Image (cartoon, grey):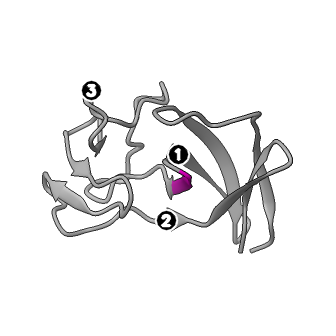
Amino acid sequence: MKRQRLANIKALPEGESVKFQFHRDGLSFEGFAFRVGDQIVAYENRCRHLPLSLDYGDGRFFTRDGAHLICQSHGALYEPLTGLCVRGPCVGASLRPLKVEFAKGSLWLVP
């Protein structure tokens, strides 16, 4: 997989997320990224219980209190920094992480 520009963003404020498309092995996937402190975290937008997007297409990935990522379909909760499912039918499974970096006003997927 080669380096891919995912999104043009001036900044990614804490508490906000950005969705993007990326390519791997000739296929297109959806991912999302968000900031926690100085760290940008990104995952494939796919629940580990069923092959569904975590959001309903609206880009909302966090619980109301911002403590966990949530699958909008069945309520599974994931730890933001690790992607580990801590509640719901996929307890113990983890979201698939993506390695990203922010440079020159863009979010990049890096191999």
**Percent x, y for residue 66?**
31, 35
Amino acid type at image mark 1: Arg
Closer to the chain start, of discs 3 and 1, is 1
Residue beneath disc 1: 35
Residue of label 2: 97
SS type, badge 3: loop
Indicate left or right for 9 with 54 as reference.
right
Gap in angstroms between the C-alphas marked 3 and 1: 16 Å
The picture quadrant where one finds residue 70 is top left
- Left/right of residue 81 with respect to residue 45 in the rendered view: left
Q: Nearer the viewer, residue 102 or 91?
A: 102
The residue identified by callout 3 is 64
Mark 1 residue crowding within 10 angstroms, few (<14) / some (14–19) / many (20+): some
Magenta stretch in the rendered image: 38-42
- Identify whether 42 is placed above or below 18: below
Determine the residue positioned at 29% across, 53% down.
Answer: 50
Q: Of label 2 and label 3, which has the lower sequence position?
A: 3
Q: Closer to us: mark 3 or mark 1?
A: 1
Residue 35 horizontal side relative to residue 6, left or right: left
Q: Tell me the kind of residue under disc 3.
A: Arg
* Type of the residue with mark 2: Pro
Q: Where is 4 relative to 19, above or below?
A: below
